[in-house]
Amino acid sequence: MEKNKKEKMKAFNDIISLCKRRGFVFPSSDIYDGFTAIYDYGPYGVLLENNIKETWWKEMTRANDNIVGLDSAIFMNPKVWEASGHVSGFSDPLTECRKCNSRLRQDTLLEDAGVFADEKMSEDEINYIFEKNIDKIKCPVCGAQDFTPGKKFNLLVQSNLGNFSSNWQKNPSYLRGETCQGIYVNYKNVLDSSRVKIPFGIAQIGKAFRNEITARQFIFRTREFEQMEMQYFIKPNDDEKVFNEWKEKRYNFYLNLGFSEKNLRWHKHENLVFYAKAAYDIEYNFPFGFKEMEGIHARGDYDLTQHSKFSGKKLDYLDPKTNERFIPHVIETSCGVGRIFLATLTEAYKEEEIKEGEKRIVLKFPKKLAPIKIAIFPLLKNKEELVSKAKEIYNSLKMDWKCEFDDNGNIGKRYRRQDEIGTPYCLTIDFDTLEKDEVTIRDRDTMEQEKVSVSDLKKYFSEKFL
Ligand code: GAP
């Protein structure tokens, strides 16, 4: 492994262990040795996750007057998934290593060998490319080069919800494989119940489930995950213009979150599904390389046409100005909360030498994403006046910003701990506070300290967290 790659993988392992040590992410059912490809978000993780979701939600539904929100159910009538094409076509090419019996994705094995493949290719197409390149392909688990012929494996997760027969597999319901189908099937409800007019968007955040064959890379590819999707309904013929507008907006979203431009890039899909007019991914430079973080897709009128056909309901739109009737086209933006979470951690994670022989780990989150905004310390834990003054200040700030009170260990240790969870400001109550009503505020990034009077704290932090 080249040196740079080795260092990146070490940093990745350090991030994974920090996530557990500091309560960001835990393996699911940890006391039972986990459950493959499922993770839980701990006390700081849920705060970071909520901040990411809130930033996206505001960007969609407040910055844009014509985007409304939705929270549709995870379960839907199974016909939804027939109409969408998921029952027949939502599959990945699966092969098995004949030596160690690992189940693997053919397209990922080809990609790792530097050969282009797409999960949307037919079984025959991908088997053909696989055989042609077999010399280059190795099992990542045991290194063997002997595989079973590939078969398409459907990713929809089945359930017996509401079906009490022992034969329920014949008529399963599904845990949704993507959140956008809940948007399409509510398009008419939203149109009829609110005053939206084309162009308009519907945004939704929610869980999705996929029976991923190879779940690797921590929270990057999981079987239960959360999506933030927005479907923008437009006039036919506006696809290209609106698609380009959303491409630009979504790229800028990441730049505004403080992601460095060198870690972002576009990937254009060459092998489009038949109905798609264009599809681009925003890729992030994860420790294991550039991978998809968000997809932006021009889906034409495919989704509404399919749902209209399968439900027998009219899903067209009457333009009040021109009296024209048409099935709206859709531009979709779709990203995974877990992937943005991992990219945010990757971007923020730094190991720094603070003086000779002394290092610190610090998460330099953008302030608006930091789980804890202000940590409040009494200088000494056993001085009652300091502790009660610190509690008073903590109580006066905690409803405006997420604060944490900490009187454990010495100040140096408390700084290290707050650095590791990315708290932008640490505020210490010392004897000057009692005498002059001043506290010491230490900045996470510069580690510089300044004195601020207690009566100015709200103004001070309002400016810092603008
Ligand atoms: N509605 C379109 C759609 O679902 P997708 O490319 O399959 O498109 C969109 O998924 C986004 O959802 C991806 O860019 C990724 O951020 C996230 N995502 C997809 N599968 C995931 C998985 N197994 N684990 C975590 N995130 C996933």
Image (cartoon, rainbow, N blue to C red):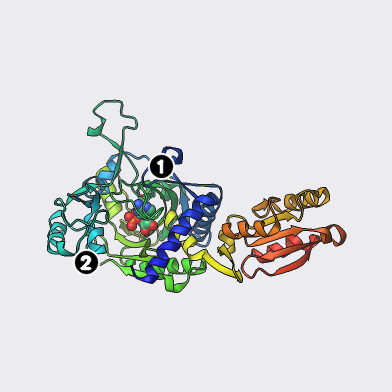
Residue 337 spot, x, y in % from top left: 44, 54
Disc 1 marks which residue?
34
Q: Quadrant of the N terminus?
A: bottom left
Residue 310 horizontal side relative to residue 343, left or right: left
The disc labelled 2 sits on which kind of residue?
Answer: Val
Disc 2 marks which residue?
115
Residue 189 horizontal side relative to residue 369, left or right: left
Q: Residue at x 53, y 54 (%)?
A: 48
Mark 2 surroundings within 10 Å by alpha-carbon count, few (fewer than 14), some (14 through 19), many (20 or more): some
State the mark number for residue 275.
Answer: none
The residue furthest front is 357
| Total numbered circles | 2
Q: Quadrant of the C terminus?
A: bottom right
The reply to whether the C-beta atoms of the residues labelled 1 and 2 are less than 8 Å apart is: no
Q: Quadrant of ligand 1?
A: bottom left
Q: Residue at x 19, y 49 (%)?
A: 99
Task: Tell me the SS state at disc 2.
Answer: loop
Within 8 Å of ligand 1, the CB of disc 2? no
The residue furthest right is 435
Name which quarter of the figure residue 295 lies in.
bottom left
Q: Is residue 384 visible?
A: yes
Q: Please tell me whether residue 342 is drawn above or below residue 255 in the rendered image.
A: above
Name which quarter of the figure residue 371 lies in.
bottom right
Residue 288 spot, x, y in % from top left: 37, 63
Within 8 Å of ligand 1, the CB of disc 1? no
Indicate which label's residue lies in the foreground, 1 or 2: 1
Residue 439 spot, x, y in % from top left: 78, 61
The Cα atoms of the two marked residues, 1 and 2, are separated by 33 Å
Task: Tell me the SS state at disc 1.
Answer: loop
The disc labelled 1 sits on which kind of residue?
Answer: Gly
Mark 1 surroundings within 10 Å by alpha-carbon count, few (fewer than 14), some (14 through 19), many (20 or more): few
Q: Residue at x 81, y 50 (%)?
A: 383
